[in-house]
Image (cartoon, coloured by chain):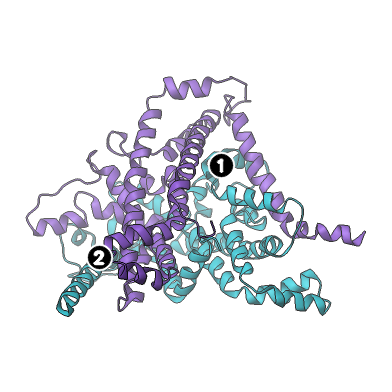
Amino acid sequence: MNKKTNRRKLFIYLFLILLAVVMVYPLVYLFFASFKPNDEIFGSASLLPKKWVLDSYKIGWRGSGQFTYGRFLLNTCRMVVPTVVFTVISSLWVGYGFARFDFPLKKFWFYVMIGTMMLPSTVIIIPRYILFKNLGWIDTYLPFIVPAVFAGYPFFVYMVIQFMRSIPRELDEAAKIDGCSSFRIWTDVMIPLCKPAIFSVIIFQSMWTWNDFFNSLVYINSVRKYPVSLALRMNLDSASRVEWNTILAMSLVCIIPCTVLFFVAQQYFVDGIVAGSIKG
Amino acid sequence: MKKRWKRFEGYVYIAPWLFGFFALQLYPLVVSFIYSFTDFSMLKEPHYIGLKNYIQAFTNDPYFFKSLGVTFMYVLYALPGKLVFALIIAVILNQKIRGIGIFRTLYYLPSILGGSVAVSILWRFIFMKDGMLNNILGVFGFEAFDWIGNPATSLFIVALLQIWQFGSSMVLFLAGLKNISPEVIESARIDGAGALQRFFRITLPLLSPIILFNFVMQMIQLFQDFSAAFVITPNGGPLKKTYLYGMMLYQNGFQFFKMGYASAQSWVLFVIIITITGCIFAFSRKLVHYEDE
């Protein structure tokens, strides 16, 4: 019996390790390939470079010639940071309203909000584009930031609501008895207690906005404003014969921030994804 | 007076969302419906043309059904692949595995990065004719195969990128499995239920709400997804085998500026998604187990 379970365990571990290797190998390969000269990338199956070069980074960093990847990374930050900040504030604000107040039609609006999570973005993108164009927002980051101001990412509102519901009501009742206004309760009681949820919102929204491709493709036109996603695709398409080592090097540069964020704040990823999805 | 106002205090807090909902969601939704009955383009004033856009899509567009078929295949590859894989691995990891944290991290990492253009580029590089996979297979004596250029495999390669990102669903399922009390499983074991029976009779029903939620959200997203396909196979791939619906919408709306027509097509997709979601929810009443019932 014991022998049998041991063999089973061993088999499971082998499977899990093999799967882990298959899952991560492409990313490890990306790392080493970015140090290979272009001709070594093709026709060699070995993981490690025979000759380590940094050319790919030097050439790749130049980007479009006119604008470097420094510019594209900065652009991405200018898009991501305000979007994330406003998403956090608006989600906490609106989430508080749904989690702690009773008001007419509350149930109705709550279900409307859940419903908008399922609304396909492709259906509304054309009128949104026209609207933003008329407002003069095309080729700016406002199409990302303004929806964040108005809690336009219902996933995060829902996440905050779920989290606030788990905070005992006695805490805000006590503050209320002490004469705190609902705004004070929000700033002094709820926000400090919501820290884990806030981290989750920051992490997910940073990552999603950083990686966004479709919206950038629609709203951002000029190379000067390109975030990294568009810059990478431009490099891929513009060269007649793709210099694969430079483009792999820049791909690596563009995923490093998300990778670091993931390893640093892993627990919040797990907590966030769970809080946002399981009905409590 | 003050008390009456108090009842509406919550509206102060949900007001930003309410405004956003009307201005950035409901209004565009209605407008897109209106556009779908016009010949709206960026170049000229819109005219009402009745059902012409819809008629054209169904009878006189060489790509419409092609693209719809491709999209259904894509969802059929990616959705079950992703969820079944996520479920199996979650169940394995749930059995007191040592180093569960490391495995979970490594399996989850692709979900974090997989949506980026960078990884789509990497994917293209792995599967192209002189790319990584063929280099490795070459060591074992296999001839180079054009995974992306061959119409038989191109769509699957794109879907595989989705399946590679099974980690986010796995984490969810793992959390759900942790909530199932061991006593329930143990008492079933004592009653003589085998491992498979325990899985299908107890674990799966208790996990079904999470599975349903994940299934629906992933499905909606997959029906519209085209970013990866757009990078891996820029022109819709060999024989338009990766010409996903989202790509067709993007091209019609933002490259050919046939915005009225694209709106009509987006509503067709919307109706398809609503119908399927409705069917799933109706069907799931029998299958999904809610604890409070």
Q: Position of residue B128 (x, y in %)?
A: 23, 50
Q: Which of marks 1 and 2 is nearer the N terminus?
A: 2
| Crowd band around label 2 with a 10 angstrom C-alpha radius: few (<14), some (14–19), many (20+) | some
Residue underneath mark 2: A19
Q: In this view, does B148 lie above or below B13?
A: above
Where the C terminus of chain A falls, by quadrant? bottom right
Write down the quadrant of residue A1 in the picture: bottom left
Rendering colour (chain A): cyan
- Asked where in the image residue B101 lies, by quadrant, the reply is bottom left
Residue at 25% x, 45% y: name it.
B148
Residue A114 spot, x, y in % from top left: 59, 51
Q: Where is residue A204 in the image (x, y as percent from the top left)?
A: 51, 64
Residue A66 visible in rendering: no
Q: Mark 2 lies on which chain?
A: A
Question: Mark 2 is on which residue type?
Answer: Leu
Kindly identify the amino acid type of the residue bearing the numbered disc 1.
Ile
Residue that mark 1 sits on: A125
* Label 2 residue SS: helix
Q: Does the image show residue B31? A: yes
Q: Residue sitting at 27 percent across and 37 percent down? A: B238
Q: Which subunit holds the residue at mark 1?
A: A
Q: Chain B is drawn in which colour?
A: purple
Helix, strand or loop at disc 1?
A: helix
Residue in the foreground of this view, choosing between B195 and B166: B195
